[in-house]
Amino acid sequence: MSASDLWSIVPELWLAGLAIFLLLVDLLTARKSLVGVVAVMGLLLSIIPIGSLLTQGARTVIFGSYAVDGFAVFFKILTVIATALVVLAAIDWLPGRSQYEGEFYALLVFTALGLVLMAASTDIILLALSIEFVSLTSYVLAGYLKGDVKSNEAGVKYFLYGAAASAVMLFGFSILYGLTGSTNLYEIARRVANAPLPALYLSIALMLSGFGFKISMVPFHQWTPDVYEGAPTPVAAYLSVASKAAGFAALVRMLMVVVDPGRLNWILLIAVLSAVSMTLGNLLALPQRNIKRMLAYSSISHAGFLLIGVAAFRGDFGTPGLLIYLLGYMFTQLGAFFVAALIGQQLGTDDIPDYAGLSRRAPVSALLMAVFMLSLTGFPPTSVFIGKFYVLAGAIDNGLLWLAIVGVVNSVISLYYYAGVIRAMYVMPAASTVPLREPAALQVALGIAGLGTLLIGLYPQPIIDLARSAVLLLRI
Amino acid sequence: MELVVFGLASAGALAGGIGVIASRPPVRSALSLLLVLGSLAIMYLLLAAQFIAALQVIIYAGAIVVLFLFVIMLLHMRSGEGRVEKLRWQGPVSYVLAGLFLAALLYAIWTGAGPHMAEPAPGFGTAESVGRSLFTKFLLPFEVASIVLLVGIIAAVVVGRPLAPP
């Protein structure tokens, strides 16, 4: 190990330092929103060391346990943006709901550190540790509103599911270690071709339960609606975006580096899981009345869409498509949850019928919500459209035409429930005409989410280039 | 001789494992866990990993089970009472699934054992090699573990402190 190794993990050190600094700021000030503002600024500043990694070649540092490549950098950027937006939204949403406001921001930044570690681990011990790290903070954040029974339920449920999924995943890791005698992913990849297939299949199946839990893939999705409904809305937004993205990062790295050399037919497995996730998530989303539950089921179906990109990893479209999809989905899904947070805060309800007449009571938010809903369906020119276009092209390119057809059919089905929200906002008569107050920080977060959704949709070229370079560097 | 010790240790581990999930009073579960962990320590000794065996006894058997017992004593005054069985069809299904999983595991072991298995490096599991790998190869996981512990403390404070009266 050399000093240059330390330079390569400056973003991680910065995030760890920032989180501890936030705890100190929280100690010294009575104005807790200041802690949130410091957190946002610190997160934005971390873009500088992250960006400086872009120009460097792909390599592993610290005895091969940590990757510095375009793939990891992409997920660092995504995580930092998502965390900053969620902190911004929470500054307006949280006061009065919890007595631990400062710790909330610190825990969010700590979670960001865990997610960044998860996306770049090339050692299964570090991977397991970082997944546990993220889980630990997520459990607490999901159950943050201690006086709220639903939030308590969310925290406990997430914890029980998560602990079981982690245990199963660790079992899978241990089998992999037993088969190859190494914990380093690249070392394992060299030896995995000699491993016996049944044990390898078992190990992959067990590991998939852990990753599947993080990305809320069917059949490990049952926690999603209950946790999203009960958790504080900014936390639900964060879980559905950042945690899912890091789960995909770890899954993709694992599958492509370790499993692919092992002569396994994993593509069909992932393709089937993808089709089932899309369809089941969509069908269960249809009857939902609660916006957070609806978004939870839709996030399950989007996990299925993203899995198309994993299954269709060969060629020029699948994996770049996955990255573009994740970035576009991040802005859109965060925006949708922020509108839900705004309405939940102002009207005290999460039911979609209560969104009636929103176009007159909060015109800007309603317009943005309509954009987010159209983007989630996959209408051009929005960000998720570009992502869907790429992963579907990847599926056709890889000979998975049936999967692409399932995807298109599911997009059409999803229009029904996304349009239901737009219908409530624009067509249904309002219960009252009093304009809603739209808090400043939440508005800024919403505006950035909307801008991201539209910009990626209208001018995707820089993002496509970034995703392409991120994929090229993946395999060292 | 080795086989006899292995047989005894694995029988102890299995018995303890069944005891953990089958016994009703939580205290008995915790003590069964002690049996599991002790038996595992013997297996580590058989694998010539003395240091790990010692750690197993000190940390798991010593500290963690004692912690479990304290928590049970503090929280569960009426241990094992008033549990209403709410699961109906899930019970049999879980037995079937667990049986299938066991079959898959046994099949994997049956077909998997062979000369391709990696040999451990010489000195594997001694205090020296554990220490060396902890501060070289696993430096980053080691440091991350310390951050996880710090976050765990903060999280425990947030979760554990009672709500302030309004």
Image: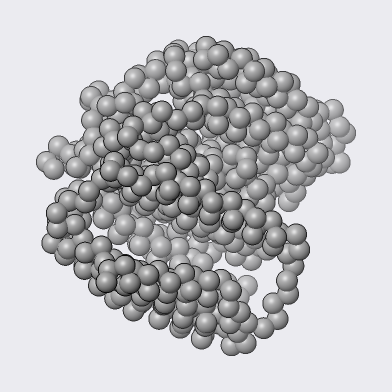
Q: Residue A157 location, x and y as percent? A: 61, 58
The quarter of the rendered structure image containing the C terminus of chain B is bottom right
In the drawing, does residue A213 fall left or right of residue A67?
Answer: right
Please report the residue visible at 62 percent of the width from the left and 62 percent of the height from the top.
A152
Q: Residue B142 location, x and y as percent? A: 26, 55
Please report the residue visible at 11 percent of the width from the left and 41 percent of the height from the top.
A2
- Residue A141's place in the image compared with A318, above or below, is below
Please report the residue visible at 52 percent of the width from the left and 83 percent of the height from the top.
B27
| Visible residue check, residue B52 | no
Q: How is the image coloured?
A: one colour
Looking at the rendered structure, the number of numbered marks drawn on it comes to 0
Name the foreground residue: A220 vs A192: A192
- Residue A187's place in the image compared with B108, above or below, is above
Task: Determine the image quadrant of residue A451.
Answer: top right
Please report the residue visible at 51 percent of the width from the left and 86 percent of the height from the top.
B73
Task: Determine the image quadrant of residue A274.
Answer: top right
In the drawing, does residue A78 fall left or right of residue B56?
Answer: right
Name the foreground residue: B114 vs B74: B114
| Visible residue check, residue B23 | yes
In the drawing, does residue A143 fall left or right of residue A370?
Answer: left
- Residue B75's place in the image compared with A408, above or below, is below
Q: Residue B132 location, x and y as percent? A: 14, 56
Q: Residue A64 location, x and y as percent? A: 22, 39
In the drawing, does residue B50 fall left or right of residue A47?
Answer: left
Name the foreground residue: A439 vs A391: A391
The quarter of the rendered structure image containing the N terminus of chain B is bottom left
